[in-house]
Amino acid sequence: MRLRLVKQGTNFDFFKRWKLWLGISGLMMVVAFASFMIQGLNFGIDFRGGTTIRTESAQPVDIGVYRDAIAVLELGDVSITEVFDPTFGPEQNVAMIRIQAQEGQEAVTPEIIASVESALKTVRPDIKFVSVESVGPKVSGELIQTAAIAVVLAIGAVLIYIWLRFEWQFALGAVLALVHDVILTIGVFSELQIRFDLAIIAALLTIVGYSLNDTVVVFDRVRENLRKYKKRPLNEVLNISINETLSRTFMTSVTTLLALIALFVLGGDVIRGFVFAMIWGVIVGTYSSIFVASAALLYLGVKRDWSKPDANAGNQYANIDA
C-alpha cells in the first residue's frame, strides 16, 4: 500500500481567487518592508562588528560551559564555536569566542576582554588565550553591502536563466516569487528581531534556489500543457499543471521540513537562526510557486504559438507520487 500525501487525480481550482492571493502577498510584502524600515534588523557580530577571542585548552571544549560562564557578564550576542583541525594534537582543544561590540563602542574594550578571560578561567583553569582580534563597523558595513549584492545578483541570474529557457512572462513571474520570498524572510526576521548574520544570507540564497526549483517544475509542466491543450484558457492550463505537479511539490516540501524541524529542535543555538530561515523559506517558497509565480503568469498572459522544440525537457520527475 502506497502512502500518498496528495490524492491522485486532484482538481483544485487554485485561480478561483487568484487576485485575492496576489493582494495578500502584496500586503505581506508591504508589512515586511515597513517592519524593516521602522525596526530594522537585529544584526549579529558579522554585521555589527565585535571581537574574536581564540582559546586553547588541554581539556575538551564544552560550548555549554563556556556560554554559561560568559552569560553572567550580559554582553549581548556571543558566538562560541569549536575549531577542528587535523594538525592539532590531542591537547589542543581550540575555540573561537565572538563578542559583539557594545553600544557606542567600535570594539570590545580591554576591560570586557579581561572579564571574559577571568570568567573562562574559573571553568577552565588551564585555558590559554592565543589571540584577540577586533572587527570594526567599517568592515561590517562592507559585509552588509556584499551580502545584499550577492542576493541581488542571484535573483538577476535567475531572471536571465528563466528568460532564456522559457519566455519573458515566465521570467517575471519567477523573479516576482523570489523577491516575494526574500522580502518576507527578511521581514519575519525584522518583526521577530531574530539575530541576522552571514548564516542567514546563506539561507536566503538557498531559499532562492529551492523556490526556483519548485517554480521551474511547475513552469515546465505549464509549457508542456500549453502545447497539449491549445484551445483551453490559460487559467485552466495552469490549474491542470499545478494539480499534476502537486504530489511532487508536497513530497519535496514535507520531507525537507521534517529534516529542518529535527535540526531546529535538536541542533542547538548555533544553527537555529539558519534553520528557522530555511523552514520559513520552504513554506513561503512552496506558496509562492503556486500562488505568486503562476498567478503573475496568468496576469501577464503568454503566447501560444510555441516555436521552441522539446517542451517536455526536464519534466520526467514532475509527477512523482508522494
Image: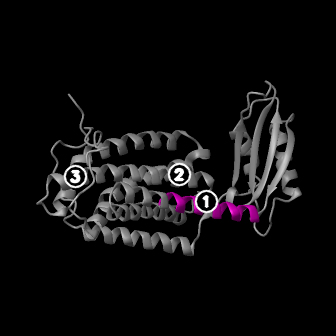
Residue at 32% x, 48% y is 217
Residue at 45% x, 72% y is 31
The type of residue carrying mark 1 is Ala
Please indicate whether residue 146 sits to the left or right of residue 317 in the image.
right
Residue under label 1, please give it. Answer: 147
Q: Secondary structure at mark 1?
A: helix
Residue 157 vertical position relative to residue 299 in the rendered view, above or below: above
Asked where in the image residue 190 lies, by quadrant, the reply is: bottom right
How dense is the environment of label 3, judged by Cα within 10 Å: few (below 14), some, or many (20 and up)? many
Residue at 55% x, 49% y is 274
Q: Which residues are magenta?
A: 138-155
Dot placed on the residue nearer the N-terminal end, 2 or 1 = 1
Dot placed on the residue nearer the N-terminal end, 2 or 3 = 2
How dense is the environment of label 1, judged by Cα within 10 Å: few (below 14), some, or many (20 and up)? some
How many marks the image carries: the answer is 3
**Observer-nearest of 313 and 194:** 313
Give the mark toward the camera: 2 or 1. 1
How dense is the environment of label 2, judged by Cα within 10 Å: few (below 14), some, or many (20 and up)? many
Question: Magenta span: helix, strand or loop, mainly?
Answer: helix
144 inside magenta stretch: yes
The type of residue carrying mark 3 is Ser
Q: Which mark is residue 241?
A: 3
Dot placed on the residue nearer the N-terminal end, 3 or 1 = 1
Q: Which mark is residue 203?
A: 2
* Residue 108 seen by the camera: yes
Quadrant placement of the C terminus: top left
Q: Secondary structure at mark 3?
A: helix
